[in-house]
Amino acid sequence: MSVESSGKRVLLVDDDIGMLTLVAVTLQQAGHTVELAGDGQEAWNRFQKTPFDIVVLDRNMPLISGDELAQRVKSASPHLPIILITGFIQGIPHPEIFAAILDKPFHAKELLACIDRSFRVSGR
């Protein structure tokens, strides 16, 4: 699923369809193009085929965890911002690879602010 807009191209990854839908609508309303993936493997496959400006992902997912997916993305694209959204904030193995970490539940404004901040910091 993809919706065209003038904002950034976002890969959004979460196995919770309710969260995925809610965050996708928020991002689309903010003017971003959003491509959805329901697990880490699907996200990795999409990432390898399509260029993205940012990745927003959940930590606890089947097939490939958010931690592992983030490491793969950073290895392939070291400067690509990644935002982690998680209900499991403790014990993140490499927090330094994330532009931001949001603890669930979070407000839409927090996510949008993290996205804006990550582009200001990276100069993208």
Image (cartoon, rainbow, N blue to C red):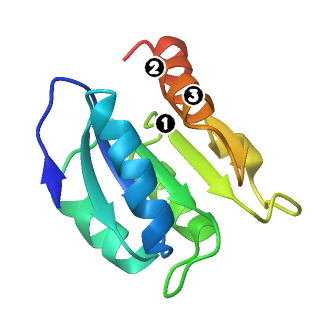
- Front residue of 38/29: it is 29
Secondary structure of the residue carrying tag 3 is: helix
Secondary structure of the residue carrying tag 2 is: helix
Q: Name the residue under label 2.
A: 119
Looking at the image, residue 20 sits to the left or right of residue 5; the answer is: right
Query: Quarter-wise, where is residue 41 in the image?
Result: bottom left
Q: Is residue 58 above or below residue 24?
A: below
- Under mark 1, the amino acid is Pro
Tell me if label 2 and label 1 are in contact, CB under 8 Å. yes
Mark 1 and mark 3 lie on one chain; the one further toward the N terminus is 1
Disc 1 to disc 3, C-alpha distance: 18 Å
The residue shown at (64%, 44%) is 97
Q: Residues within 10 Å of mark 2 (few under 14, many from 20)?
A: some
Quick one: quadrant of the N terminus? Answer: bottom left
**Disc number placed over residue 109 in the picture, else none:** 3
- Under mark 2, the amino acid is Phe
Question: Residue 98 location in percent, x, y?
Answer: 63, 42
Q: Residues within 10 Å of mark 1 (few under 14, many from 20)?
A: many
- Under mark 3, the amino acid is Lys
Question: Residue 90 location in percent, x, y?
Answer: 88, 61
- Front residue of 34/123: it is 34
Residue found at the far left of this picture: 4
Looking at the image, residue 16 sits to the left or right of residue 91; the answer is: left
**Disc number placed over residue 81 in the picture, else none:** 1
Residue found at the far right of this picture: 90
The residue shown at (43%, 37%) is 80
Q: Is residue 28 above or below residue 105?
A: above
Quick one: quadrant of the C terminus? Answer: top left
